Image (cartoon, coloured by chain):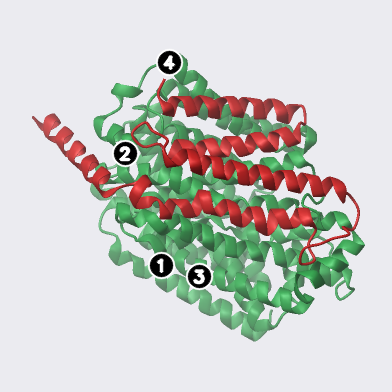
Amino acid sequence: MSDPLVVSLVVVYFAISFLVGILGRRLVKQPEHYFAAHRLFGPVIIGIASFAAIMSGFGFVGGPGLVYSRGAISLWITLSQSVAFGFSWWIIGKRLRALAEVRKFATLPEIAGDRFKSNAVRCLLALCLILGVIAYLGTQVMAGGYVVSGLLGVSLELGIAIIFGITMVYTVVAGMVASILTDVFQGAVMLIAAIAVLVLALVITGGTEGLFTPIAQKDPTLIDPLGVGTWMLALMWYFIFAIGNLGQPHLATKFLAVRSYKDLKWGGVISGGSYMVSSLLWIFVGYAALWFVVIGKLSPLAKPDEAATAFLSQIPSWASGIVYAGLLAAIMSTASGFISIGTAAIVRDIPKALKREIAYEKQIFWGRVVTVLLTLFALLFGYFGGYLVALLGALGWGYFASALVPILGIGLNWKRATREAAIASLSIALGLNIVFLILEQILKFRMPYGMPSYVIVLLLSLLAIISVSFVTKSSSEDEIDPDIRAAMEL
Amino acid sequence: MDVRTKIIVCIGITALIMLVAALVNAWALFGYLMALNLSLWLALASIRENKLEVGKWLALASFIIWSICLTGIFYYWQIYYKKVPDFTILGMHPGFFLLFPVMWLLTFIPVTLSYALLFSRVVLRDEDWNEFLRKVKKEEVKQNE
């Protein structure tokens, strides 16, 4: 068990998260509120919730671990976010908010299905989302469980039950409303943690000069702009994390929750700016852990992912309490968003695609039932799934980006995009991601030059939606419903 | 072909060349094409009434910033490859400094901050929103009749 001060801060964090989530219940008056917080929130809430949803536990543990072991290469991921939120707001923000004005949309498959007038598009996209959601939640189960177990000195199973039990209960009660409201609190915790880390890292190491000089003398590669890796990997990461932000369902859905069109104005700056501040944690925790090892204050770490905990062991306990709370916040905020999105796809999209729609007045009830079942399934999958969890865990950011960037980015900005093109693009994204999963994870095939396969899939799915649209016609131009066309012409 | 379609075609062409560049490991070319492709997305998103107007300047500014920063990053990386740099900025490798904080902060301006600054004039004017609502209402009435 950790220092009592750290434990107290973490317990307080859990209690506030729980209360904030539960309080969201009074805002839920119709299914669209439960599944998408339809038109409920202003720019500050949407901005901070968007940043919190995108900053996952990886930013707190995996990111610094990569900096520790490979230098600057992983910074190409986190530094792309200074433009990524801007791209999302520019490319899809206005369109999605306008669509929320004309129809009671609560999910992305609903929007894609109506835009392309296709149940196949709706169904394919819903399946893509459900698979991705289960894969993501599965990977977070053990990670979240280990963090809570180590912090509170409880068993792994109880740790999992605490972190995901709390997340599940508030998501059951208030759905996406709870997810967004807790995201705001959790985002604020992450920001405080990032600022605390930056100040402490610079004070302890003697500023950037004191931090980088000893590291450079040990291994100059670790402080150059590439680090250990290939340029193709660095540049492809920058590309897919910059443009792929708009394809993350837990971010894109937030545009449906914007109260007024005027509230779009500052959301991108707030979320992008917040993420930029939290990037400092990724950068400075990683380099500070490396610095401690280089100057001999810490022995070399057995695993790079220990970089964050190694750094926290060297700072005052009040600060490590805040950072641990920030880590839990990062895991829970992303998880609750994914649970809500998976639930909405199961309750609204799949039945509609199969022409067996659930009665409107019963949707919240079924939403709650599915939230429980989906979370329990993810917990069992994460706990017992073993190799399969690691296998599916590879379906992350790039998977969502390759499926959704063409559908939303091109589909909502170009009236010539056709139904056949959308189906072709989605099929390529889903099919090729699974093919590469098998090739890379099972057959141990390695892409040349360190290329991440999901960038190749994104480029191909983009090419598919553009090229197929030129040779097909359905659901394009004048065939688009007038209200959706008006939103696209805005 | 309208402006939107032209830009979509350019996005497609750059994506295709990026794919080829990736497959032959032409990483520097990939970097500049990436900058062009991202700038084109910005241009696409800022089209109003089939005109580029401010969008072309935003796209140009972001392309220039990316191109200059990437050139500097590649240049200093090659010069000090596996060596301790003989000049640093705030203790940082000059290439690293161009990546963080220079490119990180500068690109924020035309891509992210511009959205808020241009919101009322370019992104979504009040009169455009009201016209959109009128159009949707008119269609609703037409359908009900």
Q: List x then y, in percent, for residue A26.
A: 29, 66
Q: Is residue A400 visible?
A: no
Q: Nearer the viewer, residue B143 or A467?
A: A467
Q: Which mark is residue A406?
A: none
Query: Residue at point 41% right, 73% down?
Result: A19
Alpha-carbon distance for marks 2 and 1? 35 Å
Q: List x then y, in percent, for residue A38.
A: 32, 52
Per the image, the residue denoted by label 2 is: A490
Q: Give the letter of the red chain.
A: B
Q: Secondary structure at mark 2?
A: loop
To the question of a shared chain for discs 3 and 4, the answer is yes
Q: Residues within 10 Å of mark 2 (few under 14, many from 20)?
A: some
Discs 3/1, front: 3
Alpha-carbon distance for marks 3 and 1? 15 Å
Residue B70, located in which quarter of the rendered image? top right
Q: Residues within 10 Å of mark 4 (few under 14, many from 20)?
A: some
Q: Which mark is residue A188?
A: 3
